[in-house]
């Protein structure tokens, strides 16, 4: 038998012999790939490293170059793994949150965030794939309350036109809400089994660790800005009114970087319960907690404290309660006086306010509710902006109907998660319900105290949490997540 007959079986070989030879050939090819892939990866890594070193020495690397390399990598992955466009796209969306305030200007005050661009790109690419491949079609129903909210958005758009609001401000605000629709659709398509929850949790946590690490490094070593002056500025610290030295998180654009840390930390529960390397999880948790501390954001300090207390309470485990109490006492006793004074200042109200920023925020929040009284059905997109409270801004621009529906959405989901944990926290073997509960706690306080929906770089991570929560409850109703055997949960999720 000739070599040609081995690779192209003819009448001389029967079907069984053909399968044996085909299996032998595939085995040889797989072994060759297992040797070549690390070598090719190493060569590509060395080549990319040399190119970046040469480019940095010649021109300097800023955030534009980093964004270009990021989008180039995503595009290459899309091309070579087109069948994985949804998986790659979802991970890329989460990772792109690291870029913070780095946006692309489109027109006047209208800009687009890399995550926003990726959401729409992945949405349309996956939609095209579904239209072409009939086997991948599935029915996804928008939750009733969100459907009502969408109708209110349409009314707000009509209201905007008749009130003659500034177009660019109206577009900037409206698109931060409308993007919830593709976000929900992508999450509903992607999160169809527990392994994918692990993947998303892992990359959310990794993104938080990267943000925390960069923030801590530039705080402790300000000279790091010389490595990439276009990405990290020289002003890496600033002093608060309580003389507390705060990290500037210049690579992100503002200390609001920790808005992502506070919702990435809870995903450690999913990773911890699925057998990932726990030493790295612990290191990641410590880095993110320290980055939250140096940010000086009192509301985030409060959220972190509440997350720890509520988890300890719902766990009903005396060891967890004891551990949380001991760690809290030790941290409080070793905090500098400026940090304690800053934290306590968040509980001052009215004439007792020592912090001018709190007075300014209180005035803006009240302005939104006064606007709602004046225009009960809303003043339209862009009517009032930057009110530092999403509830206040929704009341102002979407009116009383918008305020009522968003309160109903967030609190009904939060109470439902609370009920899940109260009844069966010990059965939350994959940690999904625990993680979503702690994330949703952060979402409610952020909506009330800071406001994240005005800026897409802050809105998108919280819309992801909202969409993931909706998909979690949909999954429970359709497939019974809680009743599934834990053996379906993979020990390691890779993409």
Image (cartoon, rainbow, N blue to C red):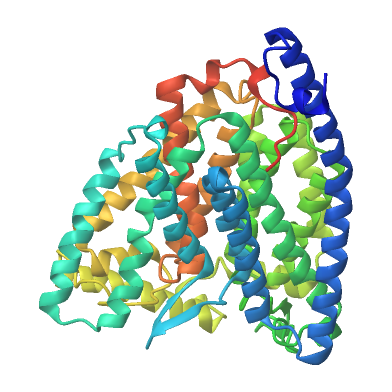
Q: Quadrant of residue 289?
A: bottom right
Q: How many marks?
A: 0
Whether residue 30 sits left or right of residue 494 in the image: it is: right
Q: Which residue appears at 74% of the width and 33% of the height?
A: 492
Q: Which residue appears at 48% of the width and 60% of the height?
A: 460
Residue 305 against residue 473 in the figure, above or below:
below
Q: Which residue appears at 30% of the width and 64% of the height?
A: 394
> Of 391 and 279, which appears nearest the observer?
279
Whether residue 5 sits left or right of residue 453 in the image: it is: right
> Of 485 and 438, which appears nearest the observer?
485
Image coords of residue 7 (percent x, y):
75, 27
Image coords of residue 69 (percent x, y):
67, 71
> Of 138 and 375, which appears nearest the observer?
138
Image coords of residue 474 (percent x, y):
41, 31
Note whether residue 381 is visible: yes
Whether residue 405 sits left or right of residue 481 in the image: it is: left
Q: Quadrant of the C terminus?
A: top right
């Amino acid at each position: 038998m000739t070599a040609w007959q081995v690779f192209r079986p003819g009448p001389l070989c029967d079907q069984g012999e053909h399968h044996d030879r085909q299996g032998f050939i595939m085995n040889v090819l797989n072994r060759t790939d297992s040797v070549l892939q690390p070598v090719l990866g190493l060569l590509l890594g060395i080549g990319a490293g040399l190119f970046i070193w040469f480019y940095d020495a010649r021109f300097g690397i800023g955030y534009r170059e980093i964004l270009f390399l990021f989008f180039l990598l995503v595009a290459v992955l899309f091309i070579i793994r087109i069948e994985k466009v949804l998986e790659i796209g979802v991970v890329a969306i989460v990772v792109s949150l690291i870029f913070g305030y780095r946006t692309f200007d489109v027109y006047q005050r209208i800009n687009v965030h890399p995550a926003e661009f990726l959401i729409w790109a992945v949405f349309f690419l996956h939609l095209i794939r579904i239209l072409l491949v009939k086997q991948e079609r599935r029915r996804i129903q928008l939750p009733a309350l969100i459907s009502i909210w969408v109708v209110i958005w349409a009314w707000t758009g009509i209201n905007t036109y008749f009130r003659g609001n500034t177009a660019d401000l109206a577009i900037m605000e409206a698109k931060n809400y409308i993007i919830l629709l593709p976000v929900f659709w992508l999450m509903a398509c992607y999160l169809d089994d527990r392994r994918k929850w692990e993947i998303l949790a892992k990359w959310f946590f990794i993104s938080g660790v990267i943000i925390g690490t960069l923030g801590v490094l530039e705080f402790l070593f300000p000279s790091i800005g010389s490595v990439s002056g276009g990405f990290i500025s020289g002003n890496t610290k600033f002093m608060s009114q309580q003389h507390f030295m705060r990290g500037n998180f210049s690579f992100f654009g503002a200390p609001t970087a920790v808005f992502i840390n506070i919702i990435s930390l809870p995903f450690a529960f999913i990773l911890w319960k699925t057998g990932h390397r726990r030493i790295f999880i612990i290191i990641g948790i410590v880095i993110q907690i320290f980055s939250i501390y140096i940010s000086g954001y009192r509301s985030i300090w409060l959220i972190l404290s509440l997350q720890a207390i509520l988890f300890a309470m719902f766990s009903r485990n005396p060891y967890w309660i004891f551990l949380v109490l001991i760690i809290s006492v030790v941290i409080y006793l070793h905090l500098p006086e400026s940090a304690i004074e800053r934290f306590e200042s968040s509980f001052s109200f009215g004439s007792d306010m020592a912090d001018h920023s709190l007075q300014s925020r209180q005035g803006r929040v009240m302005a939104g509710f006064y606007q709602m009284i004046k225009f009960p059905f809303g003043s339209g997109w862009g009517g009032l902006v930057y009110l530092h409270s999403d509830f206040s801004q929704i009341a102002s621009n979407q009116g009383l109907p918008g305020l009522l529906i968003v309160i109903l959405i967030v609190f009904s989901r939060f109470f439902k998660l609370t009920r899940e944990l109260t009844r069966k926290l010990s059965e939350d073997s994959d940690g999904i319900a625990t993680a979503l509960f702690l994330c949703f706690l952060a979402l409610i306080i952020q909506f009330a105290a800071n406001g994240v929906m005005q800026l897409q770089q802050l809105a998108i991570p919280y819309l992801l949490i909202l969409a993931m929560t909706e998909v979690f409850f949909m999954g429970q109703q359709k497939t019974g997540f809680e009743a599934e055997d834990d053996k379906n949960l993979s020990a390691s999720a890779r993409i």
